[in-house]
Image: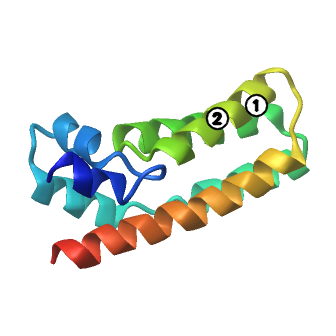
Amino acid sequence: MGLDGNEAYLPYIDVCEGTDRLMNNFKLYLSILKKFDAVPLVEEIVTTAADADYEGLQRAAHTLKGAAGNLSLTRLYEVAFAIEQRAKEETSEDALLAELQEVLAGSTQAIQRLIAESE
């Protein structure tokens, strides 16, 4: 996949970086993306934020950040990182939680489009 193909999925997925992480094994990258489901983690983030459970919020955001980072889901990583930092400060921000929902939807659409166009 060339850089031109990568740009079609930015800012949600950096396909080139994600594939590089797996020794340029694009098929493996796609198979992992097919299994990726952030919905339970996002639900946990929303719940722990509503409960002001900052330790749980930090843990869930950190887990999402790690998974998103490993898959080069760039926007999802950035928002999870911001939420994790706020949780460390024992604060949460509704705007970040709303952005997380939007970014999850955009990332999911980008993943589905990448998979569909690659089959």
| Residue found at x 52% / y 58% | 38
Q: Position of residue 88 (x, y in %)?
A: 77, 22
Q: Dot 2: few (<14), some (14–19), or many (≥20) neighbours within 10 Å?
A: some
Would you place residue 48 above or below residue 82 in this image? below
Towards the viewer: 98 or 117: 117
| Pointer 1 residue | 55
The residue located at (34%, 52%) in the rendering is 7
Does residue 30 appear to the left or right of 36 in the view shown?
left
Instruction: Say which amino acid is labelled 1.
Output: Glu
Dot 2 falls on a residue whose secondary structure is: helix
**Residue beneath label 2, please?**
59
| Secondary structure of the residue carrying numbered label 1 | helix
**Kind of residue indicated by mark 2:** Arg
Q: In what quadrant of the picture does the C terminus appear?
A: bottom left
**Would you call the spot at circle 1 few (<14 residues within 10 Å), some (14-19), or many (20 or more)?**
some
Image marks 2 and 1: residues in contact by CB distance under 8 Å: yes
Task: Identify the residue at horizontal 43%, vertical 43% (top origin).
Answer: 67
Compared across the picture, whether 64 is left or right of 25 comes to: right
Q: Is residue 83 found left or right of 2 in the rendered image? A: right
The picture places residue 6, in percent across and down from the top left corner, at 29, 52
